[in-house]
Amino acid sequence: MQGLLIEPASLPCACEALRTEVRAFLAEAMKDVPPDRRNRNWSGASPAFSRALGARGWIGMTWPKRYGGHERSSLERYVVLEELLAAGAPVGAHWVADRQSAPLLMRFAPETLAPRIVPGIARGEVYFCIGLSEPDAGSDLASIRTRAVRTDRGWVINGRKVWTSGAHRAQFMIALVRSGEKTADRHGGLSQFLIGMDAPGLTVRPILNQLGEHDFNEVTFDDVLVPHEHLIGREGEGWQQVGAELAFERSGPERYLSSTQLLLEMLDAADADDPRQAEAIGRLVAQYGTLRQMSLGVAGMLSRGGDPAPALALTAALVKDQGALVEQAMPDIAHALFGGRARPGSPLAQAMRHATLSVPSFSLRGGTREILRGIIAKGLDLR
Ligand SMILES: Cc1cc2nc3c(=O)[nH]c(=O)nc-3n(C[C@H](O)[C@H](O)[C@H](O)COP(=O)(O)OP(=O)(O)OC[C@H]3O[C@@H](n4cnc5c(N)ncnc54)[C@H](O)[C@@H]3O)c2cc1C
């Protein structure tokens, strides 16, 4: 492999003007949101907030205008995302649709489908969930058993998905299911479908996470009928499409900015004269700086266009893996520095509790640590 994996990117001046605009909006929109709600970061959801962002043109920022997008650059989008994440804004309702479902639909769905659905996503009104994982298929998606069978009326789907984030508020799912037999490379015979969450035979049941919150779900399909035109892309090529989609999923700043509230609380509580605190928090801030440069570099790659799929997959996996490592270390650092002194119920104690219970999931969601390192090794020609 030659040259730098991730070229450093810098933000043009227009981005800083946009940042000021976003900060002013957030100061007003978030003024009554208590710190504990900000801990939820991008898993917190508010349809009203999503619609307000849509009205400002801050969803679908890079998409063509004919899909309701705003034709702005990936770097401008990056600035909006990092400001939203740093503020702990409740962006969870539209997040998946903005990040990965709409790009997938615009690229692979039949011409009739994307223009009907994507503009609603850009307005902050249409939400998506992703149906990949099943009880016996997580890292190994080739083991998926949910099956689609083609009939004259459409595709009939039967099976079960688990850990489906946001299925209880989404209008649509994009599901990866088996539509044919396994091929020699194990990943053939899988296809992606657009499924309306109100389809007869589809049931959503909550699964509470270890914070006791309802984010993900079990979704079952009992003879769910899906129109022929809801097959996304080519039959049997779902695996390749999911690869491209997951690269988008892994490359954003949310992969290191999920626990910003804890960092802010630590900075607030820190004693400038305590060298132990200065060293530990300084180290964290330096790591954030490095991660930001890496993640911004990925946004720079996207803004230069072309088909960045293999390079994007590798660099996105690097950012997500390193981001999870830094965020997973934070609760222990906070406990070591402030554990005995954080007043119960204080914003610092709440942020520590929230991070302690949520960070273990950061190296599971969106691809586990071992899977990401496999992708990195492959990208570096090491296996
Ligand atoms: C907060 C959260 C939100 C999620 N949201 C969604 C969602 O919206 N949609 C969805 O479809 N899924 C979702 N998931 C599920 C997530 O994608 C899976 O948990 C993940 O892919 C791992 O699958 P698994 O849980 O079956 O674990 P497994 O794949 O069984 O992995 C268990 C352990 O074995 C290791 N392992 C597995 N295979 C290998 C290998 N080949 N080599 C080395 N080690 C290996 C893994 O790294 C892991 O440590 C979510 C998960 C979380 C935690």
Image (cartoon, grey):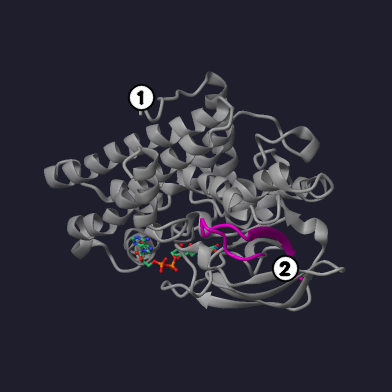
Task: Tell me: residue 33, above or below residue 304.
Answer: below
Q: Position of residue 372 (x, y in %)?
A: 39, 51
Foreground of the two, 342 or 217:
217
Quadrant in the picture for the N terminus: top left
Marks 2,1: beta carbons within 8 A: no
Residue with the mark numbered 1: 2
> Could one spot residue 265 in this view of the protein?
no
* Amino acid tagged 1: Gln
Residue with the mark numbered 2: 197
Q: Nearer the viewer, mark 2 or mark 1?
A: 1
Ligand 1 is located in which of the four quadrants? Answer: bottom left
Quarter of image, res 106: top right
Number of residues whose C-alpha sits closer than 10 Å to that of mark 1, classed few (under 14), some (14–19) or many (20 or more)? few
Quarter of image, res 227: bottom right
Among numbered discs 2 and 1, the one appearing first in the sequence: 1
- How far is mark 2 from mark 1, CA to CA? 46 Å
Task: Tell me: residue 157, above or below residue 71.
Answer: below
Foreground of the two, 329 or 129:
129
- The magenta region covers 180-198
**Numbered tag placed on residue 115 in the rendering:** none
Q: Is mark 2 within 8 Å of ligand 1?
A: no
Q: Position of residue 361 (x, y in %)?
A: 40, 63
Apparent side of residue 297 relative to residue 237 in the rendered image (left or right): left
- In the rendered structure, does residue 123 fall within the stretch colored magenta? no
* Amino acid tagged 2: Met
Residue at image x 60%, y 53%? 96
Callout count: 2
- In the rendered structure, does residue 181 fall within the stretch colored magenta? yes
Quadrant in the picture for the C terminus: top left
Q: Position of residue 230 (x, y in %)?
A: 77, 58
Apparent side of residue 282 relative to residue 193 in the rendered image (left or right): left
